[in-house]
Amino acid sequence: MKKNSITLKEINKKNILKIIIDNCPISRIDISRLLNISRPTISAYITELIEEDFIKEIGKSHSSPSGGKKAVLLQFNNKSGYILGVMIGVKTIRIGISDLRSNIIKLIKIPTEEWQGPQSVINKIVEGTKELLTMMDINKSNIIGVGIGVPGLVDSNFGLVIFSPNLTGWENIKLQKILENRFELPVFIENECRVQAIAEKRFGLAKNKNDFVCFETGVGIGTGVFTNNELLLGKNGIAGEVGHIITDLGGKKLCHCGNVGCLETLCSMGSLIEDIQEDVKSGKKSMIKPGDSLDISDVYKYYNLGDDVVVSNVMKNANYLGIGISNAIKMFNPEIIILQGKVIEFGEKYLDRIKITVAENTFPKVKDEYNIQYSKLGEKVGLIGATSIVFEKTFNLDNLNIAEEYMIKKTLRISS
């Protein structure tokens, strides 16, 4: 059994670092009061953290509580290292680099071409990160780790992609191990929707919420769930897959997961496009002609132009998603539902339709104003979450009992 050798000094330094991150700018005396540790001891620890480049002095307070000497203020040094984030999408791979507070400095996009299989996608990720580091003139030694979001069933504890229904050939892929060997850096993987939920928890609409659900809409329907302030994973990391709840018992559409009638077959962006094309083919009046190619950007265009077929199908899509959200509310009783992905472009009318459907189908006799909002974090939400995971796993500031996770390193520096 591995010996846990964490010292009181290490625990105190982690507590100091956490307080500074959560409350900066803050003075030594305020930290001393919060931790009930003597000022000389606090000052000694802070001196070490400054030498390690993780905190910095940023000036003095406007006044002191006692009217005496002004206190020197401390701030976490976001720029003492970098984090790589990767989001594997069905159509696009996003690769970004952030500082230690998940501020995305630069991102690049690469076509996934998922039909070429896992090895091709992995090679694209490796080459893309090399390109990004070269572009930014950043040495790999200044990267503390890589966070990766993957669509599908992911066991993050074992670094395993169990099955990704929308990525060809992705079954039992030991992605963490493969990429750690390729990068020679710590790698952390997680389901893409849980990654986005983590971003909302740390920096978004759920920052002060204990119970919430994120719905991500795109090629499929994904969810990330927090209950009692904890990310919901389940035994093998497959909990919270609301998009694969059987919603249409009489349905004929085969879902990518292998079942028929999943919520995803009713309200993903792919199903929306199929429904529009079927209506056009059947002769319903539309600006779209039978046989016209159609992608989501076309749907947005015709929706904004008021095309009857498109508008009616978008509203039907909102109804189906509202049913899925209603089911999630009954299961998890969240404080807020956050919508991410393609549907945000449909605006307030789409959101209003969802809210009406939820109100009509979620205990209609119980009057409740269900809090459903669009995410404010934009297209970087996944990269923000992926880089947040790396920071949390590396510094582990919320868990003071695991010495091997305490990885503050004096060698970590940014090249000038």
Image: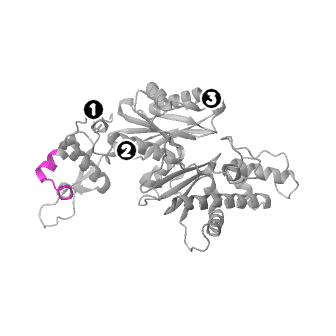
Dot 3 amino acid type: Gly
Label 1 secondary element: loop
Q: Earlier in the sequence, mark 2 or mark 3?
A: 3
Label 2 secondary element: helix
Dot 1 amino acid type: Thr
Say which of 210 and 278 sits in front: 210
Magenta span:
31-44
Q: Earlier in the sequence, mark 2 or mark 1?
A: 2
Asked which quadrant contains residue 228, the reply is bottom left
Label 2 crowd (10 A; few <14 / some 14-19 / many >=20): some
Q: Which mark is residue 140?
A: none
User: Which residue bears the numbered disc 3?
Assistant: 117
Say which of 123 and 8 sits in front: 8
- In the rendered image, residue 79, in percent from the top left (x then y), is placed at 34, 43
- Does 42 appear in magenta? yes
Label 3 crowd (10 A; few <14 / some 14-19 / many >=20): some
Of the two numbered discs 2 and 1 in the rendering, the one whose residue sits closer to the viewer: 2
Image height check: is 381 above or below 303? Answer: above
Relative side of 288 to 94, left or right = right
User: Which residue bears the numbered disc 1?
Assistant: 411
Q: Which mark is residue 392?
A: 2
- In the rendered image, residue 396, in percent from the top left (x then y), is placed at 33, 43
